[in-house]
Image: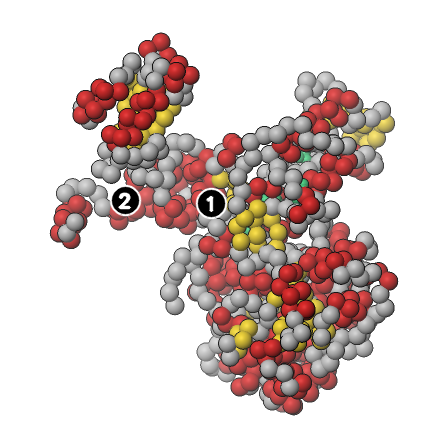
Amino acid sequence: MINITINGKQVSVAEGSTILEAAKQNNIYIPNLCYLEGVHKFGSCRLCVVEVEGARNLQASCMVPVREGMVIKTNTEKVRKARKVLYELILSDHPKDCLSCERNQSCELQELGNRLGVTEARFEGEKSVGNEDFSPSITRDMSKCILCRRCITVCNEIQNVGILNAQNRGFKTVVGPAMDLPINTVNCAYCGQCTVVCPVGALKETDAIQDVWKAINDKKKRVVVQVAPAIRVAIGEEFGLEPGTIVTGKLATALREMGFDDVFDTNFTADLTIIEEGTEFLTRVKKALTGGEATLPMITSCSPGWIKYVEHAFPLELDHLSTCKSPHTMLGALAKSYYAEKINVDPKDMYVVSIMPCTAKKFEISRPEMQNNGVPNVDAVLTTRELAKMIKEAGIDFLNLEDGQYDNPLGLSSGAADIFGVTGGVMEAALRTVYELVTGRELPFDKLHVAPIVGLEQIKTADILIENPVEAYKFLDGFTVKVAVTSGLKGAKILLDQIAKGESPYHFIEVMGCPGGCISGGGQPRPTTPEIRQKRLDAIYREDEGKQLRKSHENEYVTKLYEEFLKTPNGHKSHELLHTHYTKRGKFNEYIGE
Amino acid sequence: MSCEEKKCQCCCGEENNQQKYDRIAEVIEKYKNREGSLIQVLHMAQSIFGYLPLELQKFIAEGMDKPLSEVSGVVTFYSFFSTEPRGEHTIRVCLGTACYVRGGKKLVDRLEEILEVKVGGTTKDQKFTFEVARCIGACGLAPAMMIDDVVYKQVNPDKLEAILAKY
Ligand code: SF4
Ligand code: SF4
Ligand code: SF4
Ligand code: FES
Ligand code: FES
């Protein structure tokens, strides 16, 4: 421990802490802007300056570690003046059209202004020019960028994709893709992690709110909505609830009040995915073990940021991907076939909206592969943040809503579907079903949780030994299924490098594109700190354990769907509606042919 | 230009693009695992290829196993890297205060006419790259300009053609 004095108070703090951290632990707030706890320290904004006795200049508290005997003052006239000037300098190059900015009321720059008591902008400077740069998922408005470089850290160090970096120098500096290329021409995964950390309105999801209101107001459209598992444990934060508050029921009610005709649950097709993907896995393993050709390990395919990443980075390894579409596109495909037939509506008059924790899913629905008979499976994707905005716009008092239900036949789900929202969840859900199918016994883990693959570590692995299988799976007797789970694209690269070298020891791999899985997706409420991530994770497992129904194959509406419509898993209809193929893309998004 | 003439260009002793890329690949191979060697590689690549177009940056990014945005970040940060082809000679007209006041701007205007390119550009025959500079230390004899390392002082716009003819 190290002894220091902050604002006259003697305290002792852990060695290696920065002044900013030490102050925070002792309930002293030092204004800061570019710093992001646990993620990014760069020292570019200098708003966190403090006075340190003996130092000639003010010190950036987020960068300077404490030293024994340090005497720090965070609140002197000199410090306050310096902060104000620095803040006003940032504003001098800023558009300040807060009223029409998508970050109005949730902007860190705006909030800081309030804290610092800046009421007028004294300096009007030359403004750096910004043009909005659109892609299906991400919109960039560099006129609002304050050059904090958080997005660079996330895109390079955490996701390891490296789309964003500082280009040019001095006043002309912009943060963006190489040579100022538009974001939709490069190999961006559209994971949206950069939009979560951006403190201002410079990086954001591409808006779908207007389109969705238009569809809701169109009397001729049957507007169907579905909600991903990770939304119900996160959207409460947008209304001031504790992170990890489960609002499944309120969400259903809110959607109905907004005017959606059918309120479905993506969880239903998560259960369905387990049946389809589990069957696909067993088919591949059977082939491999009985002398046939099969590509293993098989890798999950429900995270479209991960899919786009692998298409660019490892175009030769795409056969490892499960051919299953992601659960929400499956639901869209079924709504516009199975359900449309039931209620006698022309699929062309149906409009499917997916509420997702994800920005990559906005791109996914625009892929030509995600259409059937020329009709897109899903028409619009809204992020958690966008939905919260719409609920507020509609004047709905979210906190006081009654709990509602999701509609059948695409609304019932097991706990196995809930855990799709968290890293390790898809694998666990698959194992619950596959193990039982193969051995006739329940998966031998406490509360059905495969402990080694639960948690936020980058790469997790487990070995599952198959003994005494049922007659049909005798070939698996004594076989150990080796599984690996990763979340975040940095971990994905490690596992894919192994595969590319032919050294992967695994049979089945789960990859989610965002660190921690969908609970910290690119469309989730800001901020996503390590504690908030953990709370959302705990909530997902609580939701799972709170259900009677814990296994996908016990979902009676899934069984009914097969009886009435799909017939058999991986059958003809499934292939047409629920499975897909992938596109080889160049490392830098150059065309590389088939 | 006929095909034959085009062909001729690459066999009169000049290295063709493929050979240049091969040499750059050797450089990458040599420096690839050395920490902080990107700038050196870019330097050598520019001296081999003449400039650093996007395609070459991609080649280097892939070879060095670095994000393209990082490579281009470095290229666009330093003014000695160029992403456009450069001429054999570089003309820099001074637009520092003294030269500006004493007719530097006229030199720029006249050169734009003679060379048929704007500031920052390179002539069609790849002979000259035309840039401006801020004070090159010859203020007493303004207006001044440089061609490569040679400083020309008190330049008269009407003499420009004669000066260029020497190159
Ligand atoms: S980024 Fe923040 S400060 Fe800038 S215009 Fe938007 S809300 Fe206002
Ligand atoms: S969306 Fe993901 S890959 Fe694309 S720039 Fe942002 S962080 Fe990087
Ligand atoms: S785009 Fe946003 S996160 Fe990135 S540097 Fe600019 S302000 Fe920071
Ligand atoms: S917060 Fe410390 S320099 Fe920006
Ligand atoms: S201003 Fe031109 S040489 Fe100094």
Image-quadrant location for residue A23: top right
Image-quadrant location for residue A175: top right
| Few, some or many residues within 10 Å of mark 2 (<14, 14–19, 20+) | some
Q: Nearer the viewer, residue A343 or B4?
A: A343
Residue marked by disc 1: A180
The residue at the point 47 percent across, 58 percent down is A313
The residue at the point 71 percent across, 75 percent down is A261
Q: Quadrant of the N terminus of chain A?
A: top right
Q: Secondary structure at mark 1?
A: helix
Q: Amino acid at mark 2?
A: Lys
C-beta proximity under 8 Å, tags 2 and 1: no
The residue at the point 60 percent across, 77 percent down is A349
Does the Cβ of the disc 2 residue fall within 8 Å of ligand 2?
A: no
One can see residue A530 in this view:
yes
Q: Position of residue B72 (x, y in %)?
A: 44, 42
Q: Position of residue A537 (x, y in %)?
A: 74, 60
Q: Position of residue A511 (x, y in %)?
A: 59, 63
Where ligand 3 lies, by image quadrant?
top right
In this rendering, which labeled residue sits more in front, label 2 or label 1?
1
Is residue A502 left or right of A160 when viewed as pictured?
left
Residue B48's place in the image compared with B63, above or below, is above
The residue at the point 46 percent across, 67 percent down is A583
Q: Chain of mark 2?
A: B
Q: Amino acid at mark 1?
A: Asp
Is residue A78 left or right of A591 when viewed as pictured?
right
Residue marked by disc 2: B20
Q: Quadrant of the C terminus of chain A?
A: bottom left
Alpha carbon of mark 2 to alpha carbon of mark 1: how far? 26 Å
Q: Position of residue A563 (x, y in %)?
A: 65, 90
One can see residue A148 in this view:
no
